[in-house]
Amino acid sequence: MRENDDGNDVLAGLVLAPVTVTVAAAGLGLRVLVWSLRRPVRLARLTVLAVVAWVVVTGRAWWLAVAVALLVAVLVVWWRCWPVAFDHRVTQRARGRVRSWSYRRRWGVAMTGCGLTTKDNDGDRVYPTRSVIWSTKTADWFRVRMLPGQTLNDWNTKAPALAAALDVQTLRFAPATGRFARKADLDVTAIRSDPLAGTRTAAPAAAADGLAVRVGRCEDGTDLVIDLADPWHVGVQGMSRSGKSVLLYDLLAATAGRTDVLLTGLDPTGILLAPWEHAPGVDLRHCGTDDPDHAVEVVEALVDVMDQRIGHLLATGSDKVTPGTQGMPVVVVVLEEYPGLLSVLAAHDKTTKPGGLEGRVRLGVRRLVQEGAKAGVRVVMLAQRFDAAVVGGAERSNLGTRLSMRVDNGDAVRMLHPAATPAQVAELAAAEPGRGLVDTPGQPTRWFKADLTGYGQYQDAVRTAHQQPVLVVSDDETTDMEAAA
Ligand SMILES: Nc1ncnc2c1ncn2[C@@H]1O[C@H](COP(=O)(O)OP(=O)(O)O)[C@@H](O)[C@H]1O
Ligand SMILES: [Mg+2]
């Protein structure tokens, strides 16, 4: 029996051994193939090394020439046919390799200094690990693995200190995504030089695409667009001289002279809406603070327009106005310095017989915000800060596009941008004019810089569009006017 068993084993061994070897070899081959496809740069480097070794051993120099020519040909074809992949895998990786020297030199000290290391059982220091780096001209991307006990919040809190220690301008952390991401991984964006630095001058004629108006640029290089076709309102907050009015010049200049947009609103400063004095819809605009009753009349007239449209919707059995269609312009309601207007009305209510003007404006505006979107009404509300006393939560939730420029009150920032990180809140307190945070539905909170439209340019664009003589006021004079307002 034993002899027989041994015989079977030998036979099985003879048959199985080659199969096992073949399967193992195929598996290994496949792994090498996948590895090399995922790391083409490393593969190229290995190939070059192999060729150099071959040339040194055999002394056949022409091999080297052939290999170099082949490599160049492959790179050129790749670059021409798949420029995006080439940029990511070759250009960004090559830059990242150079950048990694800087990180390698600073990583240990930075992690220890910011308290992001721990010690293992033997008392040795353990550091969070970092992946390879991809770099564009202005930013680096890599992934870090947090140590046990750390959270995204810990890293966000340390971001400013870590950015200084790693010699970059800003660090942003986000939970890592993708097939190979672990729960402890964070995707890191290190911004080296500010993509929003400098000022871009607005070009009103080129700024509008349908009802979408380009008003600035975002940190990822895309344009910041306010689309008046979007069925929601816009909230803009920022301290005095933070750039709110300029952002509105960008938006309004691009809508001047259009029949599909009707510009209305209340402007206690009297500056923003002044150039529109000859444009259609005079009864729906109020400027200055001299005539509080007129402010109330305008708000109530706007509510009437909205109610008529809603009535029309009910009568025609539709559920929303298609904005910009014939006879149905988008009604843009600008509320410049809205809390300021409310205070003027409140003061008026106190000194005269209680007429409840403030209450009537609040009520009208609340209705416009809550019911206006479906009727083609777009409220653009400006305030130094959106505190709860000025706009309640229900109204705030109807503001789809939320922009904050320099605001030094963290609660006010979080009121418009609940997902803003502590670093963003801190940075916003010292932001230069025109720079701020933007939130739009379905997009993360991000930085933007508004384009610059001078008051003279804005006034010129609006007056020309509405066929009136242009009286150009220099931007210095507007500063004086604003100070007086
Ligand atoms: N996007 C911008 N780019 C460059 N400078 C700006 C920008 N926005 C505003 N400024 C500067 O800041 C000043 C104040 O802006 P303004 O819009 O009047 O502030 P606010 O309305 O918030 O009080 C402007 O006169 C301009 O010099
Ligand atoms: Mg202003």
Image (tube, rainbow, N blue to C red):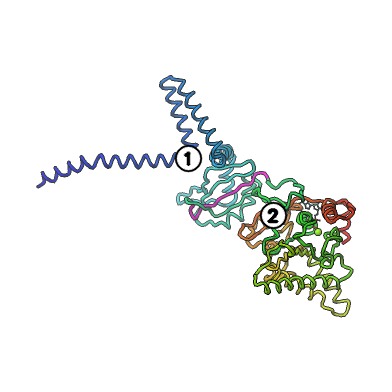
Q: Position of residue 327 (x, y in %)?
A: 75, 64
Query: In this rendering, is residue 431 above or below 414?
Result: above
**Residue 295 visible, this orientation:** yes
Quarter of the figure with residue 410: bottom right
| Furthest residue in direction left, as rendered | 1
The amino acid sitting under disc 2 is Val
Tell me the quadrant of the picture where the C terminus can be found: bottom right
Judged from the image, the secondary structure of the residue bearing numbered disc 2 is: strand
| 2 or 1: tag closer to the N-terminus | 1
Quarter assignment of residue 396: bottom right
Locate residue 360, reporting x and y percent: 79, 75
- The answer to whether one can see residue 414 in this image is no
Residue found at the very far bottom of the displayed protein: 353
Name the one closer to the observer, 418 or 478.
478
Question: Amino acid under label 1?
Answer: Arg
Q: How crowded is mark 1: few (under 14 residues within 10 Å), some or many (20 or more)?
A: few
Q: In which quarter of the image is ligand 2?
A: bottom right
Which residues are the magenta region? 181-193
Position above or below: 8 against 394: above
The residue closer to the viewer here, 22 or 160, is 22
Vertically, is 315 above or below 169?
below
In the rendered view, does 462 fall on the left or right side of 415? right
x and y percent of residue 51 in the render? Answer: 44, 27
| Residue corresponding to mark 1 | 39
How far from the left and from the top, in percent, is residue 332?
A: 75, 63
Residue 118 in the magenta stretch? The answer is no
Marks 2 and 1 in Cβ contact (< 8 Å): no
* Quadrant in which residue 430 is drawn: bottom right
Answer yes or no: disc 2 within 8 Å of ligand 1: no
Q: Which of labels 2 and 1 is toward the front?
A: 2
Write down the residue under mark 2. Answer: 225
- Identify the element where label 1 is drawn: loop
